[in-house]
Image (cartoon, rainbow, N blue to C red):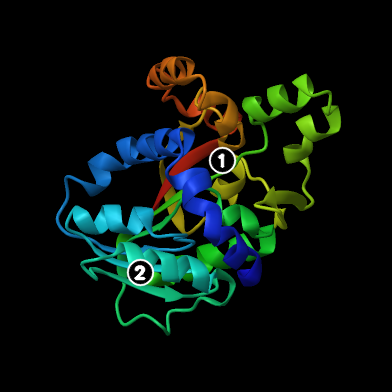
């Protein structure tokens, strides 16, 4: 899988990070994180699946101490090039082999953005919840942005194309091969109740927020880059829809836990 994302790394920022849709979805994540991140004392943060480091640098610019990891060495290399202040410690790490051994500290927050955990099977996510608990300080927080099973945009997009099987592909409990810059990546989808089940006994649920209920998925960027006025309307509508009810129907959702 590391090699798969090494290939995707070359176009990741152009196709998502700096795209209009990518920026809009990321701003929603930051909006919901702001009370937890921007208005607190400096935190020790571990980011997993950090990609090209956009979020790690955001945390660091807001005064936090950040370690950021990704399975892809190419992603890490690109992230390091962005970090002109060398304020983030980036290194390659497979989330499936992560233990507490590489880290000399415990964390206030563990963060994963934009579906990194969707590359894990149920067994692997269960193991991640176990190790994350060991890596967190007492009352530490786990904040995850995940793709749910019931995305309305996904159903609409594939139904319009006449691909009715694909319109319901997220409902499967089996891995789906998803195209990431020409590479087929095994992907699982999890509704909030699924992650709450994995967290049972270890974490309390703090909040659940939709990310991309009216803001479209990134694969629609070619269309919406020509329809910026329409995209801006959708962004404004999204600001009105922050109830957890919408989470499982969004492109992604943010779920926050606190260690018991």
Instruction: Please say if 192 is above or below 78.
Output: above
Q: Quadrant of residue 6?
A: bottom right
- Where is residue 67 drawn, in percent x and y? 33, 69
Q: Which residue is mark 2?
A: 80
Q: Residue at x 26, y 41 (%)?
A: 34
Q: State whether residue 33 appears in this view.
A: yes
- Quarter placement of the C terminus: bottom left
Instruction: Please say if 202 is above or below 157.
Output: below
- Quarter placement of the N terminus: bottom right
Which disc is residue 179 wearing? none
Tell whether 118 sits left or right of 143: right
Q: Residue at x 57, y 56 (%)?
A: 117
- Where is residue 122 drawn, in percent x and y? 67, 58
Instruction: Please say if 80 is above or below 146.
Output: below
Q: Quadrant of residue 232?
A: top left
| Label 2 to label 1: alpha-carbon separation | 33 Å
- Give the SS element for disc 2: helix
- Where is residue 20 drawn, in percent x and y? 44, 33
Q: Which residue, as the protein is rendered here, is positioned at the far front?
A: 226
Q: Residue at x 47, y 60 (%)?
A: 51
Q: Earlier in the sequence, mark 2 or mark 1?
A: 2
Query: Badge 2, how many Cα within 10 Å: few under 14, some, many 20+?
Result: many
Q: Which residue is mark 1?
A: 192
Query: Badge 1, how many Cα within 10 Å: few under 14, some, many 20+?
Result: some
Check whether the beta carbons of the residues at disc 2 and disc 1 lie within 8 A of each other: no
Tell whether 96 sits left or right of 101: right
């Amino acid at each position: 899988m590391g090699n798969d994302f090494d290939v995707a790394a070359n176009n990741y920022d152009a196709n998502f990070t700096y795209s209009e849709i990518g920026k809009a979805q990321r701003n929603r994540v930051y909006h919901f994180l702001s009370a937890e991140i921007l208005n607190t004392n400096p935190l020790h943060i571990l980011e997993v699946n950090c990609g090209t480091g956009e979020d790690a640098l955001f945390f660091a610019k807001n005064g936090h101490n950040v370690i950021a990891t990704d399975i892809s060495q190419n992603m890490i290399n690109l992230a390091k090039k962005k970090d002109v202040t060398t304020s983030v410690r980036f290194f390659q790490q497979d989330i499936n082999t992560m233990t507490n051994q590489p880290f000399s500290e415990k964390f206030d927050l563990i963060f994963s953005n934009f579906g990194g955990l969707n590359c894990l099977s149920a067994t692997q996510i269960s193991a991640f919840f176990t190790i994350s608990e060991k890596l967190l300080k007492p009352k530490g927080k786990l904040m995850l942005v995940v793709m749910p099973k019931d995305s309305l945009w996904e159903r609409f997009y594939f139904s319009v194309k006449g691909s009715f099987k694909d319109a319901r592909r997220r409902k499967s409990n089996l891995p789906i091969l998803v195209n990431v810059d020409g590479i087929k990546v095994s992907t699982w989808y999890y509704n909030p109740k699924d992650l709450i089940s994995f967290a049972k006994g270890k974490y309390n649920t703090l909040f659940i927020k939709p990310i991309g209920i009216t803001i479209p998925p990134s694969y629609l960027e070619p269309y919406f880059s020509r329809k910026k006025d329409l995209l801006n309307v959708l962004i404004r509508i999204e600001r009105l829809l922050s109830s957890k009810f919408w989470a499982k129907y969004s492109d992604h959702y943010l779920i926050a836990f606190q260690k018991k």
